Image (tube, helix red, strand yellow):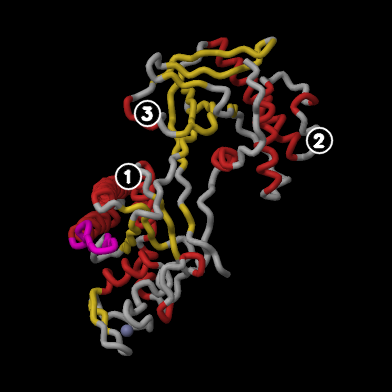
Amino acid sequence: MEIQPIKIEMKLTLKIRIFPKKAEIKLIQDQSNKYISLVNRLIQNKQSFKVKEIKDTLPSAVKAQAIIDAISIRRKKQRNVVLKKPVYFINNQNYKIDAEKQTVSFPLWDGKCKRFTFDALITDKDREMLKNKQGILRVVQKSGKWYAQVAIEIREGKSEDLGIMGIDLGLKIPAVVSTKDKVGFFGNGRMNKYIRRRYNSRRKKLGKAKKLNDIKNSKDKESRVMRDINHKISRQIVNFAKVEKVGKIRMEDLSGIRQTTKTSRKNAKALHRWNFYQLQNFIGYKATLLGIGVERINPQYTSQICLICGSINKAIDRKYVCSSCGFVGHRDIIASKNIRDCRTVNGGVGNPENHSAIGAKCSANGRADDTALNLTLKVEENSC
Ligand SMILES: [Zn+2]
């Protein structure tokens, strides 16, 4: 199976609180229900796919969006899907977010198609993000509060003329990066280990005393501490990439690693998969916000392929010695360079297309994201 390295699609979702009035809430709820029931009918093919033939009292732009949504679900062969949660989607030509006036406006059907403007809470950070390309808007209610969720699509920088940076994640050294001519070490593995140990031993004591609530609190606290550390490391790495004029970051795709005893290093990684996953995510979105592309490659042998002759050797602790050509190096640096160059066994270099990815999965995880991608049906009709 030959798969290209996976570009982490940089679509962030911006959550903006909106404040509809009572009558407006009823209307949004009505429209959301109608939207969902229309999509469900379209999935089952019990309804024409032409906007003009759809009689539901919804703005035509929203009907068109329902068609796109349904097509996308059908394309994934999920015909048995029945959507239940009310939601309302508006494409980017039919809503407007005004950061200055702190408003969000979009059309609803109220006897006829009308544009409604809602007060909104838009922070300075949101304002920055809104400078990027806006995708679809999703109106949802969560614990009594209303939100407009905007998909933000961030464009990748031109990477051809910029360097590529490989990142190897590990336990002893959280992140080792290699650019064309520089190597960087980030994080403090020893400190992380100490933190994990400290929380673990505290939880053991709590376990003996059967203090279950305290155990949960301790787990939450530990994950907050680790999250904080991952935020710091990812920020440092991405800043380093920026200074070094990196156009593209490559990391290992850790999603498909099978747990076998043969890959002991990766096994150790599997134990901390969540932590690596989070760190990769943080690096991914911070990089993309700066226009740096992100790819993931097959993690197989990245720490074992000789940089000089391409043969496979296992390092002992950090020390790598090639039995074929005598090359000696630091295991994690070798890994980060192999990742950077997409190096394959026996010397193939720099051809990501040939870098097969085991168990690689596209990161498309949400319906809204997918429809934002598949905006193939042009909605030209701006109905209100
Ligand atoms: Zn060698």
47 with respect to 62 (left or right): right
**Residue at x 33% of width, y 62% of height:** 166
Q: Is residue 332 magenta?
A: no
Mark 3 or 2: in front is: 3
Q: Is residue 290 above or below residue 28?
A: below
Give the image location of residue 33, x and y in percent. 65, 25
Give the image location of residue 352, x and y in percent. 46, 65
Under mark 3, the amino acid is Asp
Mark 2 or 1: in front is: 2
Nearer-N-terminus badge (2/1): 2
Q: In this view of the protein, which residue sits in the foreground, 178 or 119?
A: 178
Can residue 102 be seen from the camera position used here? yes
Mark number, residue 286: none
Kindly identify which residue carries mark 2.
46
Q: How many neighbours does mark 2 have within 10 angstroms: few (below 14), some (14-19), or many (20 or more)?
A: few
Q: Quadrant of ligand 1?
A: bottom left
Kindly identify which residue carries mark 3.
126
Q: Is residue 56 above or below residue 229?
A: above
269 with respect to 171 (left or right): right
Q: Is residue 256 above or below residue 330?
A: above
Q: In this view of the protein, which residue sits in the foreground, 174 or 200?
A: 174
Range shown magenta? 175-190
Query: Alpha carbon of mark 3 to alpha carbon of mark 1: how far?
Result: 36 Å
Q: In this view of the protein, which residue sits in the foreground, 78 or 7?
A: 7
